[in-house]
Amino acid sequence: MILDEMRNEIDNIDCEMVRLFEKRMNISKKIGDYKAEHGLPIYDAEREKAVLTSKVALLKDKGLEPALRSFYEGLFRVSREYQKR
């Protein structure tokens, strides 16, 4: 029973993450459009580094840092690809 409860909690979190992912990607597309209109590059290494640093700083459990870095690096990659469309 406890396992089902934990899985249910994960499912609820995942639903919220999907909602937030869509919201983030919609804004990412607008950023990509702006960059295209103004001749700016899609990739901004300094911005990604700053975002990653700020998100790592939010972690309470620093043992999760490698996983969070991997998560954001993947998210950045997906966002860049989406902006290129």
Image (cartoon, helix red, strand yellow):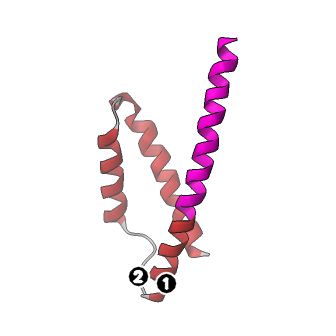
User: Does 67 lie within the magenta span?
Assistant: no
Give the x, y percent position of residue 57: 29, 42
Where the C terminus falls, by quadrant?
A: bottom right
Q: Which residue is drawn at 47% across and 44% down?
A: 70
Query: Can you identify the residue that label 2 sits on?
Result: 40
Specify the segment rendered in magenta: 1-25
Give the x, y percent position of residue 42: 46, 74
Q: Pick the residue in front: 4 or 69.
A: 4
Q: Residue at x 52, y 52 (%)?
A: 74
User: Does 7 lie within the magenta span?
Assistant: yes
31 w.r.t. 58: above or below: below
Dots 2 and 1: beta carbons under 8 Å?
yes
Does residue 78 appear in this view?
Answer: no
Q: Which residue is drawn at 66% across and 34% down?
A: 11
Give the x, y percent position of residue 22: 60, 58
The crowding category of the residue bearing disc 1, from other C-alpha atoms within 10 Å (few below 14, some 14 to 19, many at least 20), is some
Label 1 is placed on what type of residue?
Answer: Ala
Position of residue 2 in the picture relative to residue 55 (left or right): right
Element type at mark 2: loop
Q: Pick the residue in front: 30 or 72.
A: 30
Does residue 75 appear in this view?
Answer: yes
Element type at mark 1: helix
